[in-house]
Image: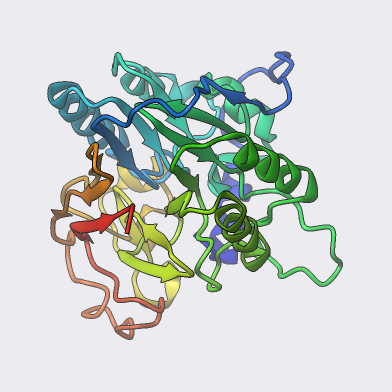
Amino acid sequence: MKNQNRRNFIQKLAVGGLMITPFKKIIASPVSVQLSNAPAKVNIRFGICADIHQDIMHDGEKRLQVFVDDMQKQKIDFIIQLGDFCRPYERNLPFLKIWEQFTGPRYHVIGNHDNDGGFSHDQVIAFWKAPFKYYSFDKNGYHFVVLNGNEHNPSPDRPVGYARFIGKEQQAWLEKDLQQTKLTTIIFCHQGLDNDMGGIENATQIRLILERANQDAGFKKVRLVFSGHHHLDYQNEINDIFYVQINSMSYQWLGDSYVKMRYNAEIDQKYPYIKYTVPYKDPIYTVAEIDSRGSFSLKGASTSFVGPSPIELGMPKHEMGYEVVPTISPRKINLNS
């Protein structure tokens, strides 16, 4: 999320945290992996979770376990988390082990809070055992691209707060990657490419890359972009590309403007900023499915708030641009139309 005060809280508290030994693994340059030559499309199902915030939520491990157990039971083709997952502290190794219980492919997107405490992107992905900071892969006749939206904007006029930028090197890689594939393409990025309220700073520039790839291909190659970060539930369509926001698995951040919910002394001490959130009672996540005809569907999920809702606590209904709800809406899109 975008709150600068939260960043200050986290950075101060992280100083006293237990950091793992700095990684010495050399991270290779991003590449396109597992690519294929336009095989016939077959059904694909993948599980998506976002913004679990293990370093904020006192029950993050339980929430992740529910997701992983369900994905195993459903025999999903792969799972992906959209960022704000966990920082590379030794204390988070049990949390990571839960993620690794899923026996199929597992993919990671870097979120802004995953670097809190002074960690580099390379340290984060080494801890997660992720391949690269940004990368692509093919599965069942579809091409998937994972972007890193946390790069530094070199402009002196950049907004204050967390880095939320995609630099020239990654842009060049993205253009080349899209040129090399003939497959319908789905993009993942932590911050929204369609949301100027805390989304990617140069989102218009990145959207133009996607739109030009479609023009050059002569068909609607890039059709879906998934993001987390905003802890909201919405969908936008811009120039034939659908931008789908996946709600947080855990909570909405309210800061100290509206709420200071307290749990108990033990939880407050171990997770000192949970009192600035309104948690969701149950973890929410989703399953995306695309059939061989290119029909896309997203499974809905809904729960309730723990305690009073944000509106009951005084937050205006549309302060975040969209209403804050503990929901992931079901969706259907024809990718070929």
Report which quarter residue 119 is drawn in. Answer: top right
Percent across and percent down for residue 61 are 29, 31
Report which quarter residue 240 is drawn in. Answer: bottom left
Identify which residue, 61 or 108, lies in the foreground: 108
Identify which residue, 311 or 173, lies in the foreground: 173
Which residue is drawn at the image coordinates 62% and 34% (left, top)?
A: 180
Residue that lies at the very extreme toward the front in this rendered image: 218
Q: Relative to residue 329, is residue 110 drawn left or right?
A: right
Which residue is drawn at the image coordinates 32% and 43% (left, top)?
A: 267
Identify which residue, 257 or 187, lies in the foreground: 187
Percent across and percent down for residue 247 are 32, 56
Look at the image and name its color scheme: rainbow
Which residue is drawn at the image coordinates 58% and 55% (left, top)?
A: 210
Quadrant (top left/top right/bottom left/bottom right) for the C terminus:
bottom left
Q: How many marks?
A: 0
Percent across and percent down for residue 89 are 54, 27
